[in-house]
Image (cartoon, rainbow, N blue to C red):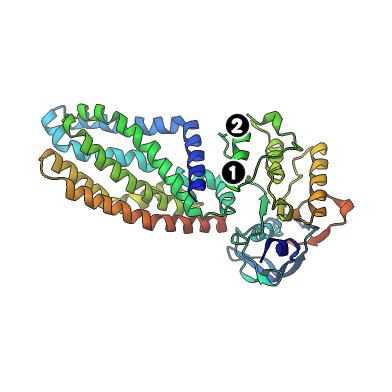
Amino acid sequence: MILIFCQYFLREFEISTSQVTDILSQLGFFMLIMMLFPLTLGPNPNKLSEYGIALVWIAAFVSVVPAYDRLFTDDYLHGFIEKAAHNDQPLGCYAAAKCLCFFLVTTIPLLIILPVICTMIGLNLSIFFELAISLVLGLFGMTLLGGIASGLVLGARRAAILAAVLVLPLSLPIIIFGCMAGIALIETTPIKPYISIMIAMDLSLIVLAIPIMQLSLKNAIENS
Amino acid sequence: MSSSELAHATLSFTNVTLFRANKLIFKNLNLNFSSGEICILNGPNGAGKTSLLRIIAGYIPISNGMMSLNGQMFEPLKSHLPIWYIGHPFGFHPNLSAAKNLSQIASMRRLSMFDEDRFNVIDFFQQPIRTLSTGQIQRLALSQLLLKSNRQKEALWLLDEPNSTLDSLHCLALETLIEEHIKTGGRVIVAAHQPLCEHLSPQIIQLEAKP
């Protein structure tokens, strides 16, 4: 199973690297949203840094959500999911590899430009490491939710917007605890409790999401 | 069921009925597919040829009736019988090269690359799928049947319009390939509008369009 997982992962990685524009446009979208805040809230660094954490979270989420409908749609339309169904390994293995790769290619570029963003909105770079950890945990959970949504909307009309509408309410706990961790960082109170809760959410999502994705992919094949 | 038994088992449909989106596609279908036999599904558009192939591939569940292999309930996706469904969409990613797509499918199903390039796919092996013509993609899809494994002989081939976009040379290659597969005890079920393998006197199943 691990071998097949790695093969799926490598395939995904090759496809992602052949579509660099997707990654760049998502990154550009994130940068643009972040640029709007100093323009709308005013350039006062104190005010910006007060809202900074929440702004980073919102921008990160809003920039990745439109990508979720892409998660399985391409493979579904090209008939790859059907091919994967004839494998010895369950479709959950494919879905997990896909989500992991998607998570990496959306999160790593975000983390690379995060220091720039932090400076732009007046956040102290000393909290960068912790902020990055909480964002990684948050985006990991988001990807799994996105995977569920993307699997469920396969074959539907206006799938992109439907996936976004499904993901955003479900992601509220992640956003709330992520922001609380960020605020704790600024107030220099312990962030460990929030991080622990986020890890717990991510772990339970892994257990829940993989069977749900497997079922929804199977269902999508039956209806294609 | 051991693989040697599988190789000679008969695949049977007993009173199979299929509804899709509340529309009756076919009703009480009784069919038998023996090993070493080619079966051609005929019928107008919408008669359910592709649906029938997709049922056997395990993609669509039947609404009623039973599908069995040697008297035992047959669940295609859980069965040990190797199944190849070659029909549109072919499962290739447009951005990856033909070679990459094919080798991924081979490694996914633990098969090794073919020795004999019967569909002349080497000519465009390094090109991304999106730059290929429909016929070339079809040839690449059919090349999956050439991938090697020790169980490929007993495989069940489900071909949906395999010769619709092929030139005469590659049609001939396909017919030879099918003939060889049948002679080694494989099973082939084809949905086709154009005549195929007529010299092998295939079992022809006529499906009727429902009003």
How many discs mark residues in the rendered view?
2
Whole-percent x and y of residue A5? Answer: 48, 47
Q: Position of A220 compared to A192: left or right?
A: right
Whole-percent x and y of residue A145? Answer: 36, 51
Whole-percent x and y of residue A103? Answer: 38, 41
Relative depth, front residue between A48 and B182: B182
Amino acid under disc 1: Ser
Relative depth, front residue between B64 and B19: B64
Q: Which mark is residue B107?
A: 1
Residue found 72% across the figure and 59% down from its top: B47
Q: Residues within 10 Å of mark 1 (few under 14, many from 20)?
A: some
Q: Position of A51 compared to B142: left or right?
A: left
Relative depth, front residue between A214 and B20: A214
* B203 is higher (above) or lower (below) than A46: below
Residue found 61% across the figure and 39% down from its top: B103
Q: Where's the C terminus of chain A, which quadrant?
A: bottom right
Distance of label 2 from label 1 (alpha carbons):
19 Å
* B100 is higher (above) or lower (below) than B58: above
Residues at marks 2 and 1 touching, judged by CB atoms closer than 8 Å: no
Q: Quick check: do tags 2 and 1 share a chain?
A: yes
Regarding residue A81, the answer to whether it shows in the image is: yes
Circle 2 residue: B128
Q: Secondary structure at mark 1?
A: helix
